[in-house]
Image: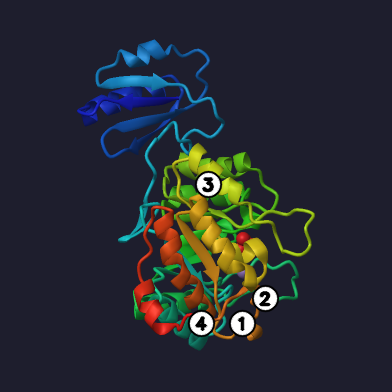
């Protein structure tokens, strides 16, 4: 259930409604809209008379939410959530691009990448320090040394950082270096990790599981939100299908659908979504048209030498070309993408 408070409702009135709901066995969370505040109430509403809640001072309406995801649902918050990472936003009018290597491999690799992507208008640097690899014999990441290099790249360029956390035990360590915590596809239903990130409160990029339904994905977001963290960024990264020509099948219908079902920002990862660098550009553009709020793109200074995911990684020139094409697409989609002016000067059109 959600309780919509009147525009002028006071803090005391909100507290009073929360206290009443707690007495009735509900957990509550206040959601801040631009105009009104809404109290999300999670619990068994079967015996609750909504009329009684509506009579409390300051309350405008009480609305039952029938979907299993509550705090993540559009009903709970009709306006888009904009996640703000110290001034860099995801979910507003601007398309936010996150780029960088699959894995942090060396200081030279990361700093060179960070400087290049910054000059292209990207706002956030990605790079895995803890890598979830299918084979235990594959490169597992530089771990804390990788995190240190990410922090150095941030210091050097001013870019924000996103990196994956594989385990609830590592939350504190990873959080001490990064701005955004990434939950990988393989961990989407690691409920202990989701709860820990909910308590942490830092923005989370929540990737869709390899075979997760849209509802399971939104329920995973709910796990983070119900612990008190509203800063969830959903990331569509492709799902497993019968198609072998691509690594995954990028589900762009899920992007348009989730934008209806939820107020949370949605970004798209065309790199893992296809596994092929030649498909990153068309899928990035299609994602923006489908309503994505941002993109997560793998890029490497020498993709053929990458220790992971080289086949889907663009080189710096390739990334610049993709981004230079985005400005027009963003405009058609009613969005903005800044930084491509510099790009158009850098990269001759082919
Ligand atoms: C990644 O972003 O490098 C990654 C491992 O992605 P996913 O969890 O989507 O496979
Ligand atoms: Mn990768």
Neighbourhood count class around disc 1 (C-alpha, 10 Å): few under 14, some 14–19, many 20 upward:
many
Q: CA distance from mark 3 to mark 2?
A: 34 Å
| Place of residue 101 in the rendered image (x, y in percent of width and height, measured from the top left) | 55, 75
Query: Depth-wise, is mark 4 or mark 3 nearer the camera?
Result: 4
Q: Quadrant of residue 30?
A: top left
Neighbour tally class for label 2: few under 14, some 14-19, many 20 plus, Cα within 10 Å: some
Mark yes or no: residue 276 visible.
yes
From this viewpoint, is residue 179 visible? no
Using the image as rendered, state which of residue 101 and residue 223 is in the foreground. 101
Q: Which residue is mark 4?
A: 317
Left-right relation of 134 to 112: right
* Mark number, residue 119: none
Give the mark nearest the N terminus, 4 or 1. 1
Q: Looking at the rendered structure, which numbered label has been put on residue 311?
A: 2
Q: Gap between marks 3 and 1, in whole Å?
A: 35 Å
Q: Which numbered disc covers residue 303? A: 1
Describe the element under mark 4 as helix, strand or loop.
helix
Q: Residue, x 77% and y 58% (percent of image)?
A: 243
Single out the residue that lies furthest toward the front.
350
Front tag of 3 and 1:
1
Q: Height in image: 339 above or below 224?
A: below
- Give the residue pinned by disc 3: 195
Q: CA distance from mark 4 to mark 1?
A: 11 Å
């Amino acid at each position: 259930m959600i309780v919509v408070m009147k525009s002028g409702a006071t803090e005391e009135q909100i507290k009073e409604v929360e206290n009443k709901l707690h007495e009735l066995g509900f957990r509550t969370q206040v959601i801040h809209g631009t105009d009104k505040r809404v109290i999300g109430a999670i619990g068994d509403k079967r015996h609750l008379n909504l009329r009684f809640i509506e009579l409390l001072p300051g309350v405008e309406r009480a609305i039952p939410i029938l979907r299993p995801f509550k705090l993540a649902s559009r009903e709970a918050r009709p306006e888009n959530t904009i996640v703000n990472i110290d001034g860099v936003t995801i979910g507003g009018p601007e398309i936010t691009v996150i780029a960088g290597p699959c894995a942090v491999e060396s200081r030279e690799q990361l700093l060179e990448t960070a400087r290049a992507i910054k000059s292209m208008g990207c706002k956030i640097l990605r790079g895995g320090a803890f890598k979830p690899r299918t084979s235990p014999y594959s490169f597992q990441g530089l771990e804390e040394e990788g995190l240190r290099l990410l922090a150095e790249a941030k210091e050097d360029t001013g870019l924000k950082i996103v990196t994956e956390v594989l385990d609830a035990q590592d939350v504190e360590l990873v959080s001490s270096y990064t701005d955004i915590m990434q939950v990988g596809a393989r961990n989407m239903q690691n409920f202990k990790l989701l709860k820990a990130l909910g308590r942490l409160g830092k923005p989370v990029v929540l990737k869709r599981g390899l075979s997760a339904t849209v509802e399971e994905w939104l329920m995973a977001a709910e796990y983070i939100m119900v612990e008190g963290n509203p800063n969830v960024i959903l990331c569509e990264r492709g799902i497993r299908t019968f198609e072998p020509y691509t690594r995954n099948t990028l589900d762009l219908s899920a992007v348009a659908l989730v934008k209806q079902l939820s107020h949370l920002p949605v970004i798209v990862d065309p790199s893992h979504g296809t596994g092929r660098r030649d498909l990153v550009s068309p899928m990035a553009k299609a994602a923006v048209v489908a309503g994505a709020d941002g993109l997560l793109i793998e890029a490497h200074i020498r993709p053929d030498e990458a220790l992971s995911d080289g086949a889907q990684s663009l080189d710096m020139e390739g990334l610049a070309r993709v981004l230079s094409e985005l400005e027009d697409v963003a405009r058609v989609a009613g969005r903005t993408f800044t930084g491509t002016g510099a790009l158009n000067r850098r990269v001759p059109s082919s």
